[in-house]
Image: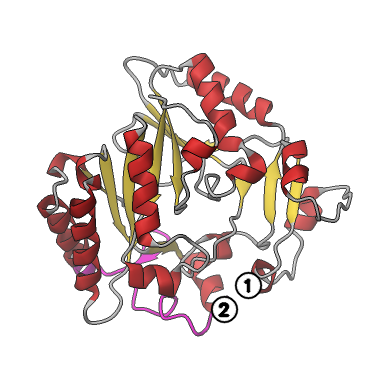
Amino acid sequence: MTGRAFKALPKAEHVIIDSWEDVFYRKNQNFRLQKGAQKLILAMNRSGFIRKGSKNCQNFGADSFYYCSPVRNCISGCEYCYLQGMLSSANLLAFVNTDDCFEELRGLLKAENIGKERKMLLPVTYDNDLYTLEKVFGLVGSWAEFLAAEKPEGLTVEVRTKCGTKAFAEAGLKASENMVFTWSVAPEENIKRFEPRTSPLRARIDAALHCADAGQRVRLAFDPLLAVGCDWQKGYDDLCALLAETGLSRKVEAVGVGCFRIPADYLRIMRKNAPESPLAFDRYEYKDGTNGYPDEKQALVTGYVKQKLEECGVPREKIYSYS
């Protein structure tokens, strides 16, 4: 992986550091300034890769829910991203000891008794967009090779992305029952306004279609739903109409739906770093450590989008709500 990264970034200046923690977690860093000139830190992870999944995320009915972060941070700059509140650094941190991660997973699958009777969901892209960075790290390919070799029954590894390129074919990936690709989608207006340096909606849909047509499991994430402006419904009307027009609504195995929500501590940092953000200063309610839309508004927004998804051809049983 290290050699691949060096080859992909031939003009990069190499600096040897003693401890990635001292650089990545040092105090008084400015996340927004660093985002405009990100550095790449290659390091060994000695503290473990896999953690328990958050209650704010959808487990799609899995008995066991964990997540893995082989890379922290991504190259896009979504205004609502929780990473700006969770991490002090906006630099990319990539762990190169992938084999240690796989060995940790083998032990966890055994400890959790994952198999025919018990299922596990393991997202590997909560803190990154590995698919967008495939040419640099090749980590999606590494995971695909691991799953193809071991075929761990009961395990689903989720790769979530906003990427609009056909990296699935470019990386030479083969369809795997143990892997699912989830495209985050949003109305085009929201993408332009709140998701800088990400692919347009149509490019994401085309990439998802290409992946599904190659026989790979594909999901969609309407997350976060943003009720911004007096005519927010039209954006989701147009999005669902495009899913029906392209046929993607009939090819996905599931759709996750969830309104914007963020841990309260992260929101305070988000407001400090982005005082001009309409998302940071919208009206939210606090509940169990998390800020989100009031219950009535959340029910209105999710109910509206679910209805539109059904109208565009997604069966009700395939639509899941994020907490």
Residue type for callout 2: Lys
Taking 135 as reference, is 195 left or right?
left
Inspect the magenta stretch and tell me whether residue 275 lies in it.
yes
Residue located at (21% from left, 46% from top): 247
Residue located at (33% from left, 62% from top): 186
Q: Which mark is residue 47?
A: none
Residue located at (55% from left, 45% from top): 130
The residue at which mark 2 appears reads as 272
| Residue 56 in sight here | no
The residue at which mark 1 appears reads as 32
Going by the picture, which residue comes out furthest to the bottom? Answer: 276
Quadrant in which residue 290 is drawn: bottom left
Q: How many marks?
A: 2
**1 vs 2, front mark:** 1
Q: Please report the bounds of the magenta region as a residue range.
A: 273-298
Image quadrant holding the N terminus, namely: top right
Q: Secondary structure at mark 1?
A: helix
Taking 134 as reference, is 156 left or right?
left
Q: Earlier in the sequence, mark 1 or mark 2?
A: 1
**From the viewer's perspective, is residue 75 above or below residue 103?**
below
Q: Position of residue 192 (x, y in %)?
A: 42, 72
In front here: 178 or 201?
201
